[in-house]
Amino acid sequence: MAEVIQNECCYRTNHLENSWDIETYLANGGYEIWKKILAGDLSPAEIIDEVKTSNIRGRGGAGFPTGLKWSFMNRHAPGSKYIVCNSDESEPGTFKDRDIMRFNPHQLVEGMMIAGYVIGACAGYNYIRGEFWEPYKRFTGAIDQAREAGLLGKDILGSGWDFDLFAHLGGGAYICGEETALLESIEGKKGQPRFKPPFPASFGLFGKPTTINNTETLASIPMILAKGGKWFADLGVKNAGGTKCYAVSGHINKPGAYEVRMGTPFADLLELSGGIWKKRKLKAVIPGGSSTAVMPAEAVEGMTMDYDSIAKAGSFLGAGSVMILDETTDMVKSLERLTWFYYDESCGQCTPCREGTGWMYRVVHRIRQGKGRPEDIQLLKEVSGKIMGKVICGLGDAAAIPVESFLKHYEHEFKHYIEHGCSIFDRV
Amino acid sequence: MSEKNQLAEELKVSVIQGDVKTRIDRWIANYPEENRKSALMPALRIVQETSNGYLTTELMDQIAEYLQVRPIEVYEVATFYSMYQHKPVGRHQICLCTNLSCMLRGSDELLEHIKHKISVTNTGEVSPDGKFSVRKVECAGACGGAPMMWIGKDYHENLTEETIDEILDGLE
């Protein structure tokens, strides 16, 4: 393996003692871009140009170009506007943003300030999942330190500009990672996605124009501006710039969050995370979180970790949440667990998803109990096909993709259960 | 129902006073004045934390009154999110992740161990001494430390039967 360069952006200070403290951040170039902005040396248009040059695509999973998203906002529109950070991080397999908030919260705070300035926001909210108490304390600790240092609040460093940041804690609901459900949740409602249009850029938080970005996206901004959009773009590949934080979990020796360059070979990432545990062979990879298609080991050969290469190999980069499944994995049991998750987390608003996720779980469950019927495989395909694209948010597709991809690659394991009442690993 | 909740209900004394009120007010101040309802989720959490770990209708009604919203608006939020509880729980509620990354590393076996350890047959049951209850939860965003559980505000990662025993034995 060629040497894999790590921790160049979001995790760059994670190895330092008290990396979450403002002193550490300031000693490592922290808040310099913010001060430059307040001094009037960096205009919103220049920032958007630099972010566009950086070729950064949204790190929450959708991969939408950040610079383009920011340009949708009219910073001179009258009234309140908001910047919202999505730290809901609930997609199974995803745990990269947690380490940004735990170890480098000031870089996220500065990224939110810069984004807030670009879009002309009066305030920003970071939506942190409710279970994340430690990251929440670190993030609010950083806000308090920034406020104390005069970098946040009223008339910041005499610039005449008021801007403040807050955290909002979730209550345990995967759906709140969907951006409009997240907005509903901040408003104190059930997290049910809104029908779009209108999009948040015109009708967002509290009905005001709002920009929503993922934690890793916003935390990358200060470095993009400090080192230049070109620097960031050059770290990555043609169609996506930068470093990327990958969360690697499952059957490996050193699970964890790794920040490497976009386009790093999958094989290198696997080696970095210690290789498959117990000297076993790789069976399958879920490359971007539970909602992305499962890939058999043969499909990941030669794959690099970026949008285009993973798409070509048959799946999606998503949030960069790589789940590793070894040769002993029962794929029917794995899918049973994932179908339960989507059934449990469907918000209940759209009928195909509310009813379909339950159907899919019950059918996979009965197959695994050895009570499957020959027609069940076709039934699963039909039900998942009737959810896909027929609901107002991405959860429906997210629930259908695992079912379709597990059946595509491992139909024989489902058939074995149906015919023999047990897994391929059990003696008949 | 716990004695404390029963007493509050009988006396119709609001739990939203003193420290609880101060904490909720701090959250209200984080949102625009006309969006007092935004403090509903923090209010539910704070009241739950200080009322034996679960919410009763009476408690939810008090929150509705305090935030000037209709009771139904509180009920629908309190029953939508999985972190709000509506039945008695143990003094320590063990929330064990059983989603895929944890399952691949043995969370199913750990669940059986925990149930045996705290002497319950099913999830959601409170242990005979009232100290523990256990529930299966969805991915908590710490798969790098799978299998994991969270109890109150603390994450516990890289669990084994031995470390679980140590952690549970160490709780009051």
Image (cartoon, coloured by chain):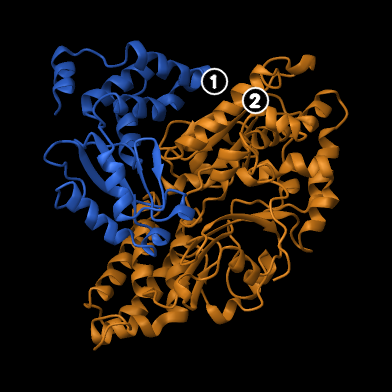
Q: Position of residue A411 (x, y in %)?
A: 40, 82
Residue A162: mark in rendering: none
Q: Position of residue A391 (x, y in %)?
A: 46, 57
Give the Cα distance between marks 1 and 2.
10 Å
Q: Is residue A247 left or right of residue A72?
A: left
Q: Which residue is mark 2?
A: A80
Task: Name the colour assigned to chain B in the rendering.
Answer: blue
Instruction: Count neighbours of disc 2 (C-alpha within 10 A) and say few if under 14, some if 14 to 19, many if 20 or more.
Output: some
Height in image: A18 above or below B105?
above
Q: Which chain is orange?
A: A
Q: Position of residue A240 (x, y in %)?
A: 74, 59
Residue B32: mark in rendering: 1
Check if mark 1's residue and mark 2's residue have beta carbons within 8 Å.
yes
Label 2: chain letter = A
- Who's the residue at 57% across and 63% down the image? A273
Height in image: A413 above or below A389?
below
Picture quadrant where residue A383 is located: bottom left
- Who's the residue at 44% across and 75% down the image? A406
